[in-house]
Image: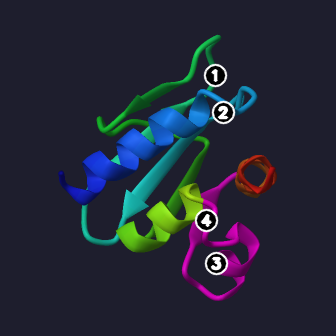
Amino acid sequence: MSEIEDLTQILNEKVKFLPPLGYKLKIELDEGGLVIWDGTGSAPVITNEDGSADTTLRMTSNNAKALMEGRLDPTLAYMTGKLKVEGKLGVAMKLAAMLGD
């Protein structure tokens, strides 16, 4: 399984237990590939097809996986440059709070 497939599967499992995001979030990996989390509908949609997003997170695949698994603190990742945020910072902060639960 590729890194992007692995991350997509982890995110698909994770969003089942999270409250609605209310935004579109794009995760772009430094190695190539992306995951879109469309949290604007009644059920979250996870896809690897590019599209517009309210917020884009850029990081390595290892950091993305660690972030989704709760092994990397989102705030620390942002402050140390392991995570770059483009777009609405509030969406990234909401995600950090959701992953921290």
Query: Tag 3's secondary structure?
Result: helix
Q: Which residue is mark 3?
A: 77
Give the residue at x 31% y 38%. Answer: 48
Q: Does residue 61 lie above or below 53 as drawn?
A: below
Look at mark 2 in the image and give the residue it sits on: 23
Q: Compute the Cα span from label 2 to label 4.
A: 14 Å
Q: Secondary structure at mark 1?
A: loop
Write the start and end of the magenta stretch as one range.
70-88
Residue 72: in magenta span: yes
Q: Which residue is mark 1?
A: 40
- Depth check: give the residue in front, 95 or 70: 70
Looking at the image, is mark 3 or mark 1 earlier in the sequence? Answer: 1
Taking the image as shown, residue 7 lies to the left or right of residue 1, namely right
Residue 92 in percent (x, y) is at 70, 55
In terms of sequence position, does the residue under pointer 2 or pointer 1 come before the other? 2
As shown in the figure, which amino acid type bears the numbered disc 3? Answer: Ala
Q: Which residue is mark 4?
A: 85
Quadrant position of residue 68: bottom right
